[in-house]
Image (cartoon, helix red, strand yellow):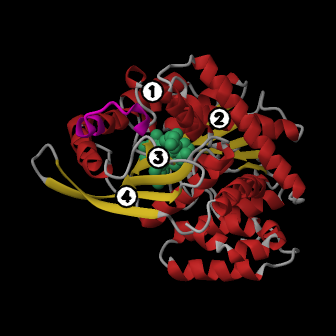
């Protein structure tokens, strides 16, 4: 991808990209994430080429400080021994303790862990809070497991992970397949092993034992605060718009809730099997019951709302994107929107895309949206509300207090407004127009680069 075809080229940048491709050959997602960031930094790199080159800044920026990978053996309810692989990628700690979620999904591999950790470094920089970037997880599949199996897995996972984390070292949280239930089991095991109540070691905890109000809602709400700012800077208003959302997990549900509170009409949501379309507007209480309580498939929605339509996924365009809407919020997983899907969305008149998931658009899709004047809220900025509120949870744990829902939500809103302003300012400074993805990368990078240079060659 190249955001800057007409611009001067940086020899240093091209050299570094070649080296990264060579060293990480099979890591497709990681290379995709790195290229998306580095190409957009080109004007800044050209300005400071000598300094960055002499500091080997880009080489250090794209090499994780540490990766741990470990065996996770656990016993299922039939007495069978299973073995999964666990990871923690501690990518960059120059701004604060490593911070980022844990993903439990069968697709997890080193490339996915590294792309997520790399993105997290930039996202955490944009929050303005003192957190470095990391990510972890396992190829464990939590679907159709009993609570005891989930607990057994989480306890085994933490028995290894605890060696590498700590409230001042590395602070994991949830991501795909890891929600309140899993964080509870992980925290219990950590506390037992450490024989100490170090609440700040994990975020997304339950409210009874050190969690923060509004953390559950934060990623989805934050996405909509960012979207509101982006729309209003471009003469649009969310009120009265139609919205479709890919996914029906934590991020999707609270993106839906805030969209509805802002006066938009959410007409479709999905899971990995297919989507439901409800032209009267999604009833979110039904979705919450299906997904948060019953942990069932989204198709169940039809049992409560027979007038809704279910569309199974087939082919390479997920069904949810075949439904026309003003605003599209991909809140499921990476590479959900490829070029073909982007073309379909542009043809059907989409105004704005809000990336709730991490890297939901391929680099070609991002480029296509921007060329076609579709407003694109980039993941590392637009979904930063989750990790920002995690950092607020850490603050509350440190000073041993709890803030009200309204207090946390207000801080979250201010953080998201500030993130949008950073993206816009950087995009303006480098004449990137509505290319907010480039603005986000530049604003995040400036802070990380200064911190890394100040701390010397480490
Ligand atoms: P959940 O596990 O709660 O939900 C994931 C949702 O995405 C489910 O509806 C799932 O459907 C759907 N999905 C569709 N296809 C896939 C696929 N191939 N792999 C995995 N899931 C798929 O996760 P979250 O809502 O927490 O996370 C969603 C996205 O948001 C991820 O990209 C995550 O990295 C990102 N994110 C999450 C944050 C958080 O605070 N939780 C913060 C910032 C970003 P099904 O049930 O059928 O698998
Ligand atoms: O991708 C993300 O930002 C998250 N999954 C949340 C991380 C966190 O530490 O709250």
Residue neighbourhood size for the residue with mark 3, other residues' Cα within 10 Å, grouped as few (<14), some (14–19), many (≥20): many
Q: Is residue 325 left or right of residue 174?
A: right
Badge number at residue 211: 1
Q: Residue at x 51, y 30 (%)?
A: 393
Q: Main secondary structure of the magenta part?
A: helix
Marks 1 and 2 sit apart, C-alpha to C-alpha, by: 18 Å
Q: Estimate the x, y position of residue 423 in percent, counting from the top left.
A: 78, 48
Circle 2 sits on which residue? Answer: 222
Q: SS for tag 2? A: helix
Residue 372, by quadrant, is bottom right
Circle 4 sits on which residue? Answer: 87
Specify start and end residues of the magenta stretch as a single range. Answer: 190-201
Marks 2 and 3 sit apart, C-alpha to C-alpha, by: 17 Å
* Labels 4, 2: front one: 4
353 magenta-colored: no
Circle 3 sits on which residue? Answer: 101
Ligand 2 near label 1 (Cβ, under 8 Å)?
no
Ligand 2 near label 3 (Cβ, under 8 Å)?
yes
């Amino acid at each position: 991808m190249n955001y800057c075809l007409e611009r001067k080229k940086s020899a240093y940048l091209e050299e570094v990209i070649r080296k990264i491709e060579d060293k990480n050959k099979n890591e497709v997602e990681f290379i995709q994430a790195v290229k998306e960031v580095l190409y957009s930094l080109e004007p800044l790199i050209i300005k400071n080429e000598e300094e960055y080159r002499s500091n080997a800044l880009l080489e250090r920026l794209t090499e994780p400080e540490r990766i741990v990978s470990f065996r996770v053996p656990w016993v299922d309810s039939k007495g069978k021994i299973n073995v999964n692989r666990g990871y923690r990628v501690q990518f960059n700690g120059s701004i604060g303790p490593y911070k980022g979620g844990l993903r439990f999904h069968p697709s997890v591999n080193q490339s996915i862990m590294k792309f997520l950790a790399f993105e997290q470094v930039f996202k955490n920089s944009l929050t303005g809070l003192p957190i470095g970037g990391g990510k972890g997880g396992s190829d464990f599949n939590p679907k159709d497991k009993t609570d005891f199996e989930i607990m057994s897995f989480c306890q085994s996972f933490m028995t290894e992970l605890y060696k590498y984390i700590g409230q001042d070292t590395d602070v994991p949280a949830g991501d795909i397949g890891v929600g309140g239930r899993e964080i509870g089991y992980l925290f219990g095991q950590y506390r037992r092993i450490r024989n100490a109540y170090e609440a700040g070691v994990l975020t997304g905890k339950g409210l009874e034992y050190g969690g923060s109000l509004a953390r559950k809602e934060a990623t989805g709400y934050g996405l909509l605060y960012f979207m509101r700012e982006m729309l209003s800077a471009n003469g649009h208003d969310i009120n009265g718009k139609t919205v479709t959302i890919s996914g029906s997990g934590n991020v999707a549900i609270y993106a839906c809730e805030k969209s509805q509170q802002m006066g938009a009409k959410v007409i479709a949501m999905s899971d990995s099997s297919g989507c439901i379309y409800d032209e009267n507007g999604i009833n979110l209480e039904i979705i919450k019951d299906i997904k948060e309580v019953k942990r069932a498939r989204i198709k169940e929605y039809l049992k409560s709302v027979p007038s809704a339509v279910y569309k199974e996924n087939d082919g390479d365009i997920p069904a949810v994107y075949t439904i026309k809407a003003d605003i599209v919020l991909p809140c499921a997983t990476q590479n959900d929107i490829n070029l073909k899907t982007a073309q379909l969305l542009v043809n059907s008149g989409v105004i704005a895309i809000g990336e709730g998931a991490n890297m939901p658009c391929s680099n070609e899709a991002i480029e296509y949206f921007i060329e076609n004047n579709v407003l694109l809220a980039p993941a590392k900025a637009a979904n930063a509300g989750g990790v920002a509120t995690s950092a607020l949870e850490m603050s509350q744990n440190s000073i041993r207090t709890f803030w009200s829902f309204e207090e946390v939500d207000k801080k979250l809103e201010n953080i998201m407004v500030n993130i949008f302003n950073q993206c816009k300012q950087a995009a303006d400074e480098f004449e990137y127009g509505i290319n907010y993805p480039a603005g986000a990368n530049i604003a995040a990078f400036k802070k990380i680069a200064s911190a890394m240079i100040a701390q010397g060659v480490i």
